[in-house]
Image (cartoon, rainbow, N blue to C red):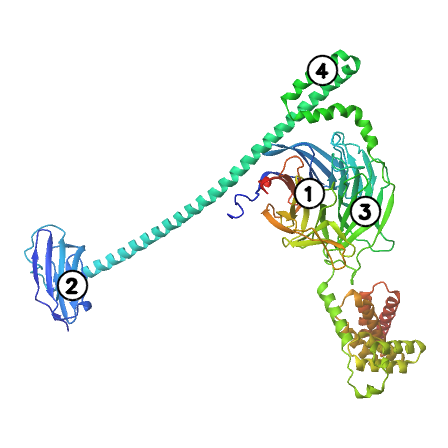
């Protein structure tokens, strides 16, 4: 329950009221002052002072000063008059209540208005700042534009001047040419006119200094034109130069090739060549050349050609043990297995070969076609015709011009249709 | 921004822009005049030649000539200054030479190639250089043929692929080294990156190299001098400058390469009045102006004592983006320094002025 502060002292002039409240030891910082037009409340815990003022005051201009152990109010009266007392004496409780509430409402409204006003001014300030920067930028831009414009105009003027000169030169040249033609014809006829013409020519010549060189040209052009033609060399004797174009690993130009894939393929090939497992103990008693997968591959090919399929398979097996990354080994071994009717092994080897033949590039087209065909054949011999057909179609996709593959694919299709009908 | 506008750097000022109703493939100044030609293909598949004159701030159409086949390229290089006949190559492989005053019937016509003539160049005319006037055409059929307007129907030289060899499109040709009556050299660029230098005096292949990417444009800095520099531009924004004064027996010519922009560099053109300045036009609609600086010593001896060239350096003077479509053709005016015309695939032709070239 706050304690009412009764002691206060005040004095007044015509326009202002000076009110002084003792602080009584309470801390000044905790003081809160609420003031409206006709109501003043000061709360200094634990003290409380309120006053309903005799007449309205201008609360915006009034001030309060805290210091020296008291609060000093300077309240400016709305109407300059002498007050009988500081507060309304005959105020009853209800009136007081009403006045208090009114005062609070008014204060609220005022606060609201103030915030609004602040907002508006802030916005205006922002707008102003923005406009100012825009103006600056505009000015800069204009300056640059002006520079450019000036350049342009200067250059245009020069161009016009040059053009005029050209036109005049041409006009003069044509007039001169006509004049000279007549003059030269007369020159040939009469020597007397020569002298007159000679005096004429310098007059015309001096008016435009530029024309002197063209004049010389003009006078000799007619008669020496024929001579000039003869001075040109005869047309060259016809010949052909044969041209070779730069070969590339891939026959397509840089922009057409799928470089990334082709690089990958080349890398793989290079790597494959390098991985040679030479740490198998059984190989120690083999000859040097027998440890070379390429040599073994060749041996295998030869034996295949002669019909020695088992021998070929052996050669390929050894080669694969030495270097498991060469797709051609698997491809050829698949062919051997086909001949030996080891169909499952053939399928395995063709699949392995196809695996190693990724990425698909024009370079390994042939190998891929062969792999598909061999696998397809193996499937068909196992009577797995649909898988076989799939492989044949894949081969056809790579090499659509191969008649044999087409024929075989047709045969398989018929077989499939035949079995479907019968079942 | 301020560096590009610095007091000494050349500026590229767009003087006139003209919208066209057809695709323009080539634009050329008519020598000794303020007139320019636009060559191209109309929407209905016919060829168009339009002659414009520069009047103040606009281009005035003087004449329009329509031909049955779209026209890809043209040159004034092989005619005399009085005649100023235009030589054109069209999409059908025909080489025609026209008198623009009487364009109904060509002065010279031959079905030179089986496929489109991609590029044409002329030498011996316009009072530049010496020797017989000749025109070279490069075509998609892989051959490069040299024609003399005085000889009908057969070319005077033919550079064709060996029998059985797969052919590569020839995209660009240029004459060079025509400093006297006998000497002449042709440089051809192909779509697989091959650049070949043919010597017409000895009728042989003098040098070849491969720059990996298709060659869009080659040009010597001057046709009529002992060959000095060759610029070759390619796809993917690269161009190479070769120093042609010193040929090493195995290494060929020294070169430097520069990557200018991400897109194809369609054309390179040297300034007629200063052979060390050239402009490249790009697929992103931009133009770059370059200056070549020679090295302290243009040639040095290698370990075996043979001479080899030293490449210099190239610096970018200015660049500007004019269009969103590739600028496919570019031509400097031989009469006014800094005046140039460029044609782009957005169907506009622009006349530009490059300032302050005197101060370089």
Q: Separation of disc 2 and disc 4 at Cα? A: 116 Å
Structural crowding at the residue carrying mark 2, measured as other residues with C-alpha within 10 Å and reported as few (<14), some (14–19) or many (≥20): some
Q: Are marks 2 and 4 on the same chain?
A: yes
Structural crowding at the residue carrying mark 3, measured as other residues with C-alpha within 10 Å and reported as few (<14), some (14–19) or many (≥20): some
Do callouts 2 and 4 mark residues in contact (Cβ within 8 Å)? no
Q: Which of marks 2 and 4 is nearer the N terminus?
A: 2
Structural crowding at the residue carrying mark 1, measured as other residues with C-alpha within 10 Å and reported as few (<14), some (14–19) or many (≥20): many
Question: Could you say whether the residue bearing mark 3 is in a helix, strand or loop?
Answer: strand
Q: Quadrant of residue A336?
A: bottom right
User: Which label sits in the foreground, 2 or 1?
Assistant: 2
Query: Disc 2 marks which residue?
Result: A66
Q: In which quarter of the image is residue B48?
A: top right
x then y, percent, for residue A406 = 86, 66
Query: Disc 4 marks which residue?
Result: A197
Question: Could you say whether the residue bearing mark 4 is in a helix, strand or loop?
Answer: helix
Left or right of B9 on screen, residue A266:
right
Query: Would you say residue B69 is visible in this rendering?
Result: no
Decide: is A27 above or below A128. below
Decide: is A6 above or below A167. below
Q: Quadrant of the C terminus of chain A?
A: bottom right
Q: Determine the chain carrying the residue at label 1.
A: B
Question: Could you say whether the residue bearing mark 1 is in a helix, strand or loop?
Answer: strand
Query: Disc 3 marks which residue?
Result: B199
Q: Separation of disc 3 and disc 1 at Cα? A: 35 Å
């Amino acid at each position: 329950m706050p304690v009412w502060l009764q002691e206060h002292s005040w004095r007044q002039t015509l326009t202002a009221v000076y009110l002084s409240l003792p602080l009584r030891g309470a801390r000044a910082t905790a003081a809160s002052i609420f003031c409206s037009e006709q109501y003043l409340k000061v709360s200094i815990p634990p003290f409380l002072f309120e006053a309903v003022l005799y007449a309205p005051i201008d609360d915006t201009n009034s001030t309060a000063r805290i210091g020296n152990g008291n609060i000093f109010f300077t309240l400016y009266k709305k109407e300059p008059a002498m007050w009988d007392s500081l507060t309304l004496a005959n105020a009853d409780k209800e009136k007081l209540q009403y006045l208090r509430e009114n005062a609070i409402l008014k204060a609220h409204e005022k606060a609201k208005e103030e915030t609004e006003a602040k907002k508006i001014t802030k916005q205006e300030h922002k707008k102003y700042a923005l406009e100012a920067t825009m103006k600056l930028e505009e000015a800069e831009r204009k300056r640059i534009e002006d520079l450019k414009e000036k350049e342009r105009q200067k250059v245009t003027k020069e161009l016009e001047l040059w053009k005029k000169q050209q036109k005049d030169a041409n006009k003069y040249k044509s007039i001169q040419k006509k004049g000279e033609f007549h003059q030269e014809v007369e020159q040939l006829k009469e020597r007397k006119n020569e002298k007159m013409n000679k005096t004429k020519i310098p007059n015309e010549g001096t008016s435009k200094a530029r024309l002197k060189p063209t004049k010389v040209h003009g006078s000799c052009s007619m008669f020496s034109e024929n001579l000039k033609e003869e001075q040109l060399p005869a047309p060259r004797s016809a010949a052909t130069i044969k041209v070779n174009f730069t070969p590339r690993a891939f026959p397509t130009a840089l922009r057409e090739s799928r470089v990334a894939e082709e690089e990958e393929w080349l890398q793989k090939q290079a790597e494959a060549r390098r991985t040679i497992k030479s740490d198998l103990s059984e190989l120690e008693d083999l000859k040097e050349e027998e440890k070379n997968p390429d040599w073994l591959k060749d041996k295998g090919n030869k034996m295949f050609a002669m019909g020695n399929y088992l021998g070929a398979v052996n050669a390929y097996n050894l080669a694969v043990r030495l270097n498991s990354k060469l797709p051609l080994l698997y491809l050829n071994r698949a062919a051997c297995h086909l001949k030996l009717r080891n169909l499952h092994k053939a399928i395995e080897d063709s699949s392995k070969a196809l695996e190693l033949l990724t990425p698909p590039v024009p370079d390994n087209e042939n190998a891929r076609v062969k792999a598909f065909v061999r696998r397809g054949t193996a499937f068909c011999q196992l009577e797995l015709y649909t898988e076989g057909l799939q492989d044949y179609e894949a081969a056809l996709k790579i090499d659509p011009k191969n008649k044999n593959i087409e024929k075989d694919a047709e045969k398989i299709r018929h077989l499939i249709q035949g079995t479907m009908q019968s079942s | 921004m301020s560096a590009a506008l610095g007091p000494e750097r050349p500026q590229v000022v767009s003087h006139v822009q003209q919208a066209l109703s057809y695709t323009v493939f080539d634009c050329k100044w008519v020598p000794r005049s303020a007139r320019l030609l636009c060559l191209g293909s109309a929407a209905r598949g016919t060829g168009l030649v339009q002659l414009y004159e520069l009047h103040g701030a606009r281009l005035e159409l003087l004449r329009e000539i329509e031909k049955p086949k779209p026209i890809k390229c043209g040159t004034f290089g092989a005619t005399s200054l009085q005649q100023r006949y235009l030589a054109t190559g069209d999409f059908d492989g025909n080489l025609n030479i026209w008198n623009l005053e009487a364009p109904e019937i060509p002065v010279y016509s031959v079905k030179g190639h089986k496929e489109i003539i991609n590029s044409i160049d002329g030498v011996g005319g316009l009072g530049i250089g010496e020797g017989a006037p000749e025109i070279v055409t490069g075509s998609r059929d892989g051959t490069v043929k040299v024609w003399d307007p005085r000889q009908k129907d057969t070319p005077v030289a033919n550079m064709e692929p060996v029998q059985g060899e797969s052919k590569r499109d020839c995209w660009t040709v240029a004459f060079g080294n025509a400093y006297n009556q006998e000497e002449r050299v042709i440089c051809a660029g192909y779509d697989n990156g091959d650049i070949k230098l043919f010597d017409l005096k000895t009728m042989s292949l003098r040098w070849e190299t491969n720059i990996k990417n298709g060659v869009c444009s080659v040009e010597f800095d001057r046709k009529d001098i002992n060959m000095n520099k060759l610029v070759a531009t390619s796809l993917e924004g690269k161009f190479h400058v070769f120093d042609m004064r010193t040929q090493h027996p195995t290494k060929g010519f020294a070169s430097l390469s520069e990557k200018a922009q991400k897109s194809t560099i369609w054309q390179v053109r040297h300034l007629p009045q200063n052979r060390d300045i050239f402009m490249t036009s790009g697929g992103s609609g931009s133009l770059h102006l370059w200056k070549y600086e020679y090295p302290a010593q243009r040639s040095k001896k290698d370990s075996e004592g043979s001479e080899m060239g030293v490449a210099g350096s190239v610096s970018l003077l200015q660049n500007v983006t004019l269009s969103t479509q590739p600028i496919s053709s570019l031509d400097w005016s031989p009469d006014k320094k800094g005046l140039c015309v460029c044609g782009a695939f957005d169907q506009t032709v622009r006349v530009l002025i490059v300032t302050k070239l005197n101060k370089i």
